[in-house]
Amino acid sequence: MSEKKFASQADLEEKKTSFIKLSDNAYAYTAEGDPNSGVIIGDDGVMVIDTTATPIMARALIRHIRGVTDLPIKYVVLSHYHAVRVLGASAYFEEGAEQIIASRGTYEMIVERGEQDMKSEIERFPRLFSGVESVPGLTWPTMVFEKEMSIFMGKLEVKLMQVGMGHTKGDTIAWIPAQKICFSGDLVEYDAAAYTGDAQLEEWPATLEALRALGAEQLIPGRGPALVTPAQVNAGIDYTKDFVTTLLDSAKQAVAAGSTLKEAMALVRSRMDPKFGHVFIYEHCLPFDVTRAVDEAGGIKHPRIWTAERDQEMWHSLQH
């Protein structure tokens, strides 16, 4: 049996992007399973949630924004530290960006592993990082918050909140209380695999319930279509919860049985493939997901750092 192409190296087909109006102030930028971004237009400026992977990709989003407003893009919010979310940031400075905002946990992860993560992700996603030479380097926040902060964009309040750990220890959501619209980052996925290589899997389900308790009527997940009714929001939260709990429960069983990583992978596949085998980036994510789940089930609480070299070693060890 021939080895599968590493991560997303075989995924070279451009995805169709959509710019969807959620309210007079909020838009979703989605791309068929590629990382989503959010846009909030206040009275005096614009906020972008997640920058896209490169300045070149960011300019495609900026063109959409300029189709609906000429207000300056004042704020860039990082939902977490992953390169596909943050490396497009430099494009927004040309549009008036004053602040790049992240949680304390996200800042700490950039300090600890930003450089290794950037190299790792560029190798995994050649299509997303085409034009990577336009990236000037790591994206550093200019403003860091603890737990929660409100930004008033004129009269419109946007809350940046950490409701708990999940996809990473620094996960941040953007919440418009007056409109019950939530941009969740990768805490919620829909019709796409949850990447859990840097996750806090044990905490993730409780974080999802804290998110559900907000009562969002519309939610933009990290990947997948915009969820534009309360029923769809609940379905997205349920889907993500099912993904991460099935993964961790299977890993715990494998660790308790003394299984090898390859045996753990087979057990996880037997539970996950029937439900999730058809969704975006599943084959890319699963080896990283199982490795992290086995680590966490075995007592490694803080995720080990992925490097381009470690990525390849793990991938080849799990192939036939």
Image (cartoon, rainbow, N blue to C red):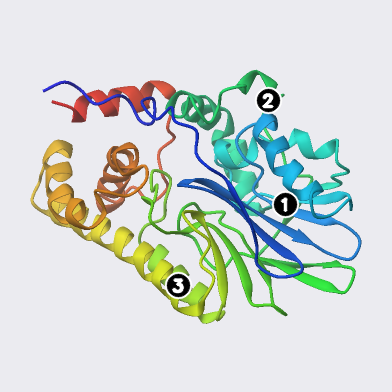
Q: Nearer the viewer, residue 82 or 9?
A: 9
Q: Amino acid at mark 3?
A: Gln
Nearer to us: label 1 or label 3: 3
Amino acid type, callout 2: Val
The residues bearing labels 2 and 3 have C-alpha atoms spaced at a distance of: 35 Å
What residue is disc 3 on? 232
Residue projecting furthest to the left: 257
Given residues 285 and 231, the one toward you in this image is 231
Q: Position of residue 132 (x, y in %)?
A: 61, 22
Point out residue 239 in the picture as x, y percentages from the top left corner. 35, 65
The label shown at residue 135 is 2
Could you tell me the amino acid type at mark 1? Val
- Element marked by disc 1: strand
Q: Which comes sooner in the sequence, label 1 or label 3?
A: 1
Q: Count neighbours of disc 2 (C-alpha within 10 A) and say few if under 14, some if 14 to 19, many if 20 or more.
A: some
Indicate left or right for 286 with 172 as reference.
left
Q: CA distance from mark 1 to mark 3?
A: 23 Å
Determine the residue positioned at 76% across, 66% down: 25
Is residue 203 visible from the viewing direction of this image?
no
What residue is rendered at 80% in x and 52% in y?
75
Which sits in the foreground, 310 or 185?
Answer: 185
User: Disc number at residue 48?
Assistant: 1
